[in-house]
Image (cartoon, rainbow, N blue to C red):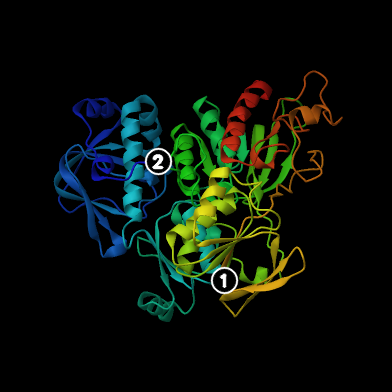
Amino acid sequence: MVTATLEHAFPKLTDEELRLLEPLAVCEYFNDGEFIFRAGQEEIDLFVVKSGAIEIQNPSDDHKVVATHEVGGFSGDIDLIIRRPPIVNGIARGRTNVLRVRSQRLQEVMIKIPRLSDKLLVAFQMRRELMSQMEKFGFIVIGCGLCSDTTLLREFLHKNFVPFTWFDKDTEVGKTAIEKYGEFPIIQKPDGTTLVRPDLQDLAYECGLWHECPSQSVDLAIIGAGPAGLAAAVYAASEGLNTLVLDKLGPGGQAGGSSKIENFIGFPSGLSGADLAMRGVLQMVKFGAKLIAPTRVEQFKPGAGPKDPHELTLDCGAVISAKTVLIATGVTWRKLDAINAKNYERAGVYYACTNVEVMLHDTQDVAVVGAGNSAGQAAMYLAECCPSRTVHVLARGRFGPSMSEYLCQRIAATKNIKVHENTRITRVNGGAYLIDSVDLLEENGKESHLDVKAIFVFIGAEPGATWLPDTVKRDDKGFIITGTDVAQSGHWPLKDRIPCPLETTVPRLLAAGDIRSGSTKRVGFAVGDGSLAVTCVHTVMPDS
């Protein structure tokens, strides 16, 4: 990955690029000190400086100046592409002349002027990386780090790449806010608005993640924004299909909880699951796909005839009519089956390993439960970010057969990782908020005790999408059967064609990624599945 630099983050447009942009923009003037845009405003456009300058201020840090766009410079970061409210203010310095590209025309710019599109996308990503390194930026989250409700909000913001700064309730900032508002968690927006104990839907609305959710008709509805769903959305939208992606929480799927993915082609240094998700969302939005999250599908109604659309009923009340539907909901980690484990979910027992969770347990000994790649990646991340801690890897069976060889070798060579084979946790011990130890049971019946302050769980895979009707057949483990398995199942209803490779027992309902029976549970495989799904869509989608 390229490390953010000022050159990457703040390039200037050439005279030729400005000439190409002018037909898609309007020319406007602002007086010195006048707001060009404000943090939190609903509609945000692209502004390119022709004369004067735009000063960018951070309202979350006493309006500190973080950048100044001079002639040839332009405003915005990834929020501009995803159509979210800005988290900074833009103020004219001197009499300022700008080219203004309305948000509704930004996709046209990205498609018609490819070299400008590349420059904008690189700059926006680099700017977000630089922002993440600032001490105080974006939303302010105040609450108890080891309380599940605070962790849930922090995980939600992280998963949806919303910049935020967290203050524990015991810091001076935390004490002052709690004295004023009486309870926590507390969210302070860049525009000064304060939310007390918001639910995810309210927070999504206030972040600009949640837009109006009208009933609509699309060519392809994708349920699940993990690697398979995002890949399908990129390819479908780039080929002109009207594409809508739905997710119950936000983009990334199970891979979004990975601290580092190193065996995905094209990224020799690796990248985090969150970075992969952000890049996928930017690509799909660039081509015109839309994302709605958080929302849940409550019912699937198959089309009555071969050309009738399927219908998806969402928890917001909207009904989506889709010529084809792709199920890419992935799987969820199996819950830790141990006494008291549920009491500490998101408060010491975690089913992801990102900086959101890890920073709460700096210098503390921890346990990782599992023996697959996700467990191995988590163990390495925890060991490397704090060499003074011991990371205990607990495998129910043998360690190694289900993990990539490069990870096994790294773990074996890392001094502060200790592997426990044929061992499981039977009980989690601790007080009201803090875990202090776990009880272990080995396969031979030997019991032991381990002092750890957090447990990161990556075991098993539970297929979801329980809202699907019984006509969608599954294998004996609950994964959805497709293609050849469908043809041989006796449940394929059509006589005029065979199912495509990803088609389920319901025609024009496809499945891809981890939820599909027989799939390999790797990011690269899921991306390939998502790409193949678009080929299937072209094959099975009825003519208009």
Could you tell me residue 79's position as x and y percent? 39, 46
Residue extending furthest toward the top: 496
Q: Secondary structure at mark 1?
A: loop
In this image, 401 relative to 357: left or right?
Answer: right
| Residue that badge 1 annotates | 452
> How far apart are the alpha carbons under marks 1 and 2?
42 Å
Residue 22 figure quarter: top left
Residue extending furthest toward the right: 490
Could you tell me residue 421's position as x and y percent? 67, 59
Instruction: Determine which of the numbered discs, if any, sits on residue 81 in the image.
Output: 2
Q: Nearer the viewer, residue 277 or 300?
A: 277
At x 52%, y 25%, the residue is 240
Residue extending furthest toward the left: 94
The residue under label 2 is which amino acid type? Ile
Q: Nearer the viewer, residue 137 or 197?
A: 137
Could you tell me residue 167's position as x and y percent? 40, 70
The residue under label 1 is which amino acid type? Val
Q: Nearer the viewer, residue 293 or 277?
A: 277
Q: Residues within 10 Å of mark 1 (few under 14, many from 20)?
A: many
Residue 80 figure quarter: top left
Instruction: Determine which of the numbered discs, if any, sits on residue 466 in the image.
Output: none
